[in-house]
Structures are given as C-alpha cells and as structure tokens.
Image (cartoon, helix red, strand yellow):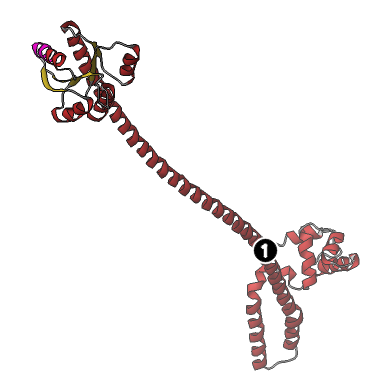
C-alpha cells in the first residue's frame, strides 16, 4: 500500500485524517504542521503522496508554495486539503500543478479515489517525462550523428570539388599540349616533306652530274689508247662511281639518267598531269623555258618527232 504524508497545522483534523487513511490501508509516514517543515520531512521519508493544507497562519510559506517546491525538487505529487473554497485559492492550486483538491471535512468516499488518481497521474507523468527524456536523448544523439555525417559529407564534397577542379585544369593543360603537339606534328610534316624533297633533289643532282659530267669523260679516256694498267684503274674508278650512285639509282628510271635536275623537275610535274603553263608558274620559269625542256626530255627518252603523249610515255617507265 502507498506511503502518505499529512501536512496540517491543526492537530485534531490531522489526527482524524491519519486514522481515516490507516483504516483504508495506507501508511502515514509523517505529519507536519507547516510548509517549510513539510519540505524537510518529505526529503527524509520520501512519501508517495502529500496531503497538504493550504494556509499556515504565522508562516511565511503557504501550502501552495511548499507544494511547488516538493513537486519540482522531490518529484512527489501533492493533493491539497482545505476548508477554504474560494475560487482564487482553487485557481492557485490548479496553476501550481496540484494533483487533486479535497474540501474539509474530508469523507472516505472522496479521499481514496482522489489519492489513487493523483498517484496514478504522477506515475503517468513520470513515465511520460522519462519517455520525453529518452526521446530528447535520441534526438540529440541523432542530431549529433547527422551533424557529424553532414560535416563528413562537406569534407568529401570539398575534396571532390578540389579533385574536379584539378581534373578540369589537367584537361585544359592536355588540350593545350594536344594543340601544341598538333602544331608541332604539322611543322614536322612540312619539314620532313621538305627534307625528302631536298634529299630527292640531291640524289637526282648527284646521279645527273655523275652521268653527265663524269661518266662521259671516263668513256673518252678509255678511247685514248690506255695501257692495260691504266685501263684497269679506269674500270675500277667507273665501277666505284656506279657503286656509290647505286643506292640513288632506283629513284630514277634508267631512261632519266641523262636528264638534268631541272629536266627531272619538269618530268615529275608532267607525270602529275600539270600543263606547260602550270609547270612554268610552279617552277617560276617562262613558258618558253619549260617548252624547251619538254623538247629536250622527248629527245633524251627517244620520242622526239613521234606522236607519243609525253605524260603517258613517262608513266610507262615506272
């Protein structure tokens, strides 16, 4: 059964109330005669409920003020008992958070349900407060967790933005390098083409010069009545010259060996389908000069005076 405490400055009503409560099966742990004394006693005996009178003549603290402290500090429910029924007092008890109000004289019929309801309400309040506290704790934990998660996400987003920025910079750098590489490749192609043309011209010039300015004189020397030893030396010289120019020879058809470098340029352009006027413009020569070289070419390849197309004939030698 529940343990109760009575606070009343009148001894006879307090004793009568004690007897009534004991008869109902309750335990009366203490009886106090003032609000201040009730607070000190309640701290010691820790009752389940206080039955508190409202007015204590001559005391600084009334029952309502004492009840507020007891409920707040000790978490003990208070039911007020009073012979005063003024509306002002009743309203104060409601504002103070009282768990019930009993008017003197107190009957057994009204006291038991009031006590049980007050204790039940207090238990419900405690459970609700505990639930709210637990909910608050979980909310705080969840808020802290979300705060940590948001902070981590902020760090990851910042890192991702930094990496993306670096990637964008690398892409721009690669685009710039790619553009430079394309320009370099284009320049290299031009240089390689020019080098190839220069090399071909040099090969053509070497072969042409050997054929035109060296070999004919060797032939003339052979016809001057050389001794056997001299003839041998001349043969060696001729063989060595041919060996030296042999790597260049595949570049030219044997038909072209007697052509000069300028005539070979004309041959190449004719093979490309260029007309005399076009060749003159490309080589920066006069129309008559190019026409004269075409005549020399026809003579050297053996088609002068024949109705043979020069380009067709040149292409047939490849």
Residue 31, image x, y percentages: 14, 22
Characterize the local packing of mark 1: few (<14), some (14-19) or many (20 or more) Cα atoms within 10 angstroms: few
Residue 130 part of the magenta-drawn span: no
Query: Is 211 displayed left or right of 283 in the figure?
Result: left
State the count of labels. 1
Residue 244, image x, y percentages: 64, 79
Query: For the point 13% across and 27% down, which residue is it?
Result: 45
Q: Nearer the viewer, residue 213 or 95?
A: 95
Q: Is residue 48 above or below residue 44?
A: above
Residue 91 picture quarter? top left
Q: Which residues are magenta?
A: 18-24
Task: Indicate the quadrant containing the N terminus: top left, top right, bottom left or bottom right.
Answer: top left
Q: Nearer the viewer, residue 49 or 295?
A: 49
Query: For the point 17% across and 27% down, which residue is it?
Result: 42
Residue 73 picture quarter? top left
Q: Is residue 268 above or below residue 24?
A: below
Residue 254 picture quarter? bottom right
Query: Is 60 displayed left or right of 10 in the figure?
Result: right
The secondary structure that dominates the magenta segment is helix
Residue 223, image x, y percentages: 75, 87
Whether residue 259 appears in this view of the structure is no
Where is mark 1, residue-wise? 187
Residue 103, image x, y percentages: 24, 10
């Amino acid at each position: 059964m529940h343990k109760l405490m009575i606070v009343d400055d009148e001894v006879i009503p307090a004793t009568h109330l004690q007897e009534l409560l004991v008869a109902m099966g309750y335990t009366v742990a203490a009886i106090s005669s003032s609000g201040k004394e009730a607070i000190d006693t309640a701290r010691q005996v820790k009752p389940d409920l206080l039955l508190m009178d409202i007015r204590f003549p001559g005391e600084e603290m009334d029952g309502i003020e004492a009840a507020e402290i007891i409920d707040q500090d000790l978490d003990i429910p208070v039911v007020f008992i009073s012979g005063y029924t003024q509306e002002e007092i009743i309203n104060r008890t409601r504002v103070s958070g009282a768990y019930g109000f009993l008017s003197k004289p107190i009957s057994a019929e009204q006291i038991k349900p009031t006590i049980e309801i007050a204790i039940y309400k207090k238990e419900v309040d405690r459970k609700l407060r505990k639930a709210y506290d637990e909910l608050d704790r979980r909310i705080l934990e969840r808020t802290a967790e979300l705060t940590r998660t948001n902070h981590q996400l902020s760090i990851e987003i910042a890192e991702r933005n930094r990496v993306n920025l670096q990637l964008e910079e690398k892409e721009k750098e690669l685009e710039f390098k790619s553009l430079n590489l394309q320009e370099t490749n284009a320049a290299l192609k031009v240089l390689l083409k020019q080098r190839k043309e220069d090399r071909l011209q040099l090969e053509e010039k070497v072969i042409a010069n050997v054929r035109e300015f060296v070999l004919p004189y060797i032939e003339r020397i052979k016809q001057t009545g050389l001794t056997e030893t001299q003839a041998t030396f001349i043969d060696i010289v001729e063989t060595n010259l041919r060996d030296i120019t042999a790597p260049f020879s595949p570049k030219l058809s044997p038909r072209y060996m007697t052509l000069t470098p300028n005539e070979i340029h004309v041959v190449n352009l004719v093979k490309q389908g260029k007309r005399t006027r076009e060749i003159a413009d490309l080589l920066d020569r006069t129309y008559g000069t190019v026409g004269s070289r075409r005549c020399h070419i026809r003579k050297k390849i053996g088609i002068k005076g024949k109705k043979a197309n020069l380009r067709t004939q040149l292409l047939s030698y490849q």
